[in-house]
Image (cartoon, helix red, strand yellow):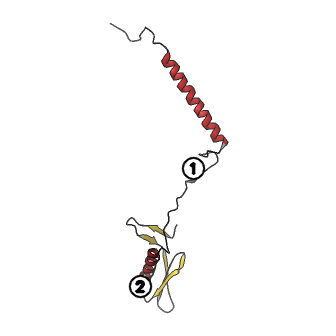
């Protein structure tokens, strides 16, 4: 699970962790970013301070969002979609040869004259 994600309205969702302090205050910290921490008399106020700090970091470009594509592991195994794989190269050559043979045969059959007889009965 990632520490943040996008919400449909374009806002960024960020995981935070909070704890009560012995002094009775509340501390909230952004998961993975201990620099973004706030302590306040209430949990709501600590969360709002962290939200404000995150917003400032985003606005200043200090914190950025990037998309990281997640590869499909089912498509990454030896011999699959690798143009440098000799087995893949051989398969593609054989496929091209078979297609060409099928095309040549279809053209030869199309060049043959139709016979004068018909299998359709006439009255």
Q: Quadrant of the C terminus?
A: top left
Q: Is residue 37 left or right of residue 120?
A: right
Query: Residue shown at 55%/30% (left/top)?
Result: 99
Q: Nearer the viewer, residue 44 or 53?
A: 53
Residue closest to the far right: 86
Q: Quadrant of residue 101?
A: top right
Q: Which mark is residue 75?
A: 1
Q: Nearer the viewer, residue 105 or 5?
A: 105
Image mark for residue 45: 2
Question: Horizontally, is 119 left or right of 96 in the view?
Answer: left
Residue farthest to the left? Answer: 123
- Which residue sits furthest front? 60
Within the image, what quadrant is residue 93 found in?
A: top right
Asked where in the image residue 49 lies, by quadrant, the reply is bottom left
Residue 117 appears at what percent x and percent y? 43, 8
Q: Tag 1, which secondary structure?
A: helix
- Identify the residue shown where x is 47% and y is 12%: 113
Residue pushed farthest bottom? Answer: 23
């Amino acid at each position: 699970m990632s520490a943040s994600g996008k919400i449909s309205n374009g806002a960024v969702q960020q995981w935070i962790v909070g704890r009560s302090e012995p002094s009775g205050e509340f501390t909230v910290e952004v998961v993975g970013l201990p620099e973004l921490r706030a302590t306040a008399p209430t949990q709501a106020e600590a969360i709002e301070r962290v939200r404000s700090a995150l917003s400032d970091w985003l606005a200043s470009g200090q914190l950025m969002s990037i998309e990281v594509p997640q590869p499909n592991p089912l498509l990454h195994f030896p011999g699959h979609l690798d143009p440098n794989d000799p087995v893949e190269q051989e398969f593609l050559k054989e496929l091209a040869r078979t297609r060409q043979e099928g095309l040549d045969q279809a053209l030869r059959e199309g060049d043959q004259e139709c016979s004068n007889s018909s299998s359709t009965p006439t009255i």
